[in-house]
Amino acid sequence: MEKTKFSSKFTFVLAAVGSAVGMGNIWMFPYRVGQYGGAAFLLPYFLFVALFAYVGLSSEFAFGRLTSTGPVGSFDFAFKEKGKKHGAIVGCIPMVGTVGIAIGYAVIVGWVFRYLLGSIDGSMFLVESDIFFSQISNSFGSIPFHLIAIVATMLIIGSGVLKGIEKISKFMMPTFFILFLIIAIRVAFLPGAIEGYKYLFIPKWEFLLNPMTWIMAMGQAFFSLSIAASGMIIYGSYLSKKEDVVKLSIVTAILDTSAALLASFVIIPAIFAFGMDPTAGPSLMFITMPKVFAQMPMGELFAIVFFTSVLFAGITSLVNMLEVASEACITQLNISRKKAVIIIGILTFGVGIFIENVDVLGLWMDLVTIYIVPFGALLGAVVIFYILPKNKLMCEINLNAKKAKGNLYYNTGKYIYVAITLIVLILGIILGGIG
């Protein structure tokens, strides 16, 4: 039976962007831009995004479309093409990394849902933001909200590619951009916001001489595009043979970068307008921004808009992560989508309830994002460019492309992209994370 495909390239891009746009765009990108030279940081960042989108993202899309399955089946296909065994076992490694992120990510999405409810009923503004956050980020502190996040994601995935993933992406991603744009316009009129724009975009060129600027730009670009040999492979498997994968990869990267910039236009100017710390990192979203909304005229309304937007970004990313494991269960265990989704949902929640404490969650996410995910991404790059036959990959890359890619594309992937994924893994371990 032919596998279900996205109905158009537009809906495919929205789903892919939904996977890519996540918390890292919202809480990490803004402060890294300011921390590493303002507009100067954008130069290496754009260069890495262009490279990762052109070669890394497109090759994962093509790999998935070629094999019509996720990482487990795709790795198995590539190994068999070389007469080798155990490809499915190797393919489990990036899938485990994605599920690991999903387990922690679901906790964070639950927090976002609680903040949205707190914005609606006003409870978020009745206590100090650090106290409000501590109430839900302790051990077993957000079980109902965490559960709702997972159940909502399960319902979306359980409805299938067209009625679930595509339908929700068509609604949530345009709404995300519209709502964030509304807040960005409002923030632009706050007294003192101009200092935030200066912090973000006045280039400090001397930072380009600092190796950490390039390392952090590389890590931010790498993780932002979700090139982890799993989620983008599975979405590629739902892509029509009529589409140009390189073109769609570039469009996906442009929209993902636009989301990160839009988040910067919201968060950093707002923080400067109220004299707060722009380098607070993850706490920007859960502690600093609520303080901003508490002081902003009509702040309750804009808090609702903000956390609705963040919730949509979180849910669409979580959908992609859990779809990877669900599809593997469907194809490898030969069970129904409904049963697969229930199994993965129970696993995600069952493990996640024990890491709801913010400190434990931090250790969990560090373990997954520093070691497992980059290693899985490296395996994916090696499989695509060293194990999968070159003619198989290039035929899929050039299918319906207006301009055929040749040795330049392939050699860039084989010798530069693979090397960079190895560098990301090594530097992440040395520096304690760069994404």
Image: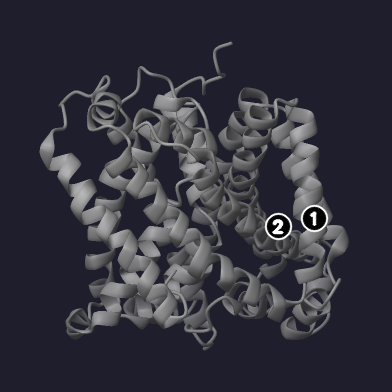
The image position of residue 108, as x and y in percent, is: 69, 64
| Crowding at mark 2 (Cα within 10 Å: few <14, some 14-19, many 20+) | many
Q: Is residue 177 above or below residue 188?
A: above
Kindly state the secondary structure of the residue where label 2 is placed.
helix
Can residue 37 be seen in this snapshot? no
Q: Quadrant of residue 247?
A: top left
| Residue found at x 37% / y 82% | 35
The image position of residue 171, as x and y in percent, is: 60, 36
The image position of residue 175, as x and y in percent, is: 57, 43
What's the residue type where badge 2 is placed?
Ala
**Quadrant for the N terminus in the image:** top right
Which residue, given by chain and number where applicable, does mark 1 sit on? 349
Describe residue 90's horizontal placement relative to residue 143 as left or right.
Answer: left
Asked if marks 2 and 1 touch (Cβ < 8 Å), the reply is yes
Q: Is residue 393 above or below residue 71?
A: above
Which residue, given by chain and number where applicable, does mark 2 sit on? 106
**Quadrant for the C terminus in the image:** bottom left
What's the residue type where badge 1 is placed?
Phe
| Residue found at x 77% / y 46% | 345
| Crowding at mark 1 (Cα within 10 Å: few <14, some 14-19, many 20+) | many
Residue 369: assigned label: none
Q: Nearer the viewer, mark 2 or mark 1?
A: 1
Q: Nearer the viewer, residue 67 or 238?
A: 67
Kindly state the secondary structure of the residue where label 1 is placed.
helix
Q: Quadrant of residue 106?
A: bottom right
| Residue found at x 36% / y 79% | 34
Mark toward the start of the polypeptide (2 vs 1)? 2
| Residue found at x 26% / y 19% | 400
Report, in whole angstroms, how far the alpha carbon at label 2 lies from the one at label 1.
8 Å
- Total label count? 2
Describe residue 395's horizontal placement relative to residue 179 as left or right.
Answer: left
Can residue 145 be seen in this snapshot? yes
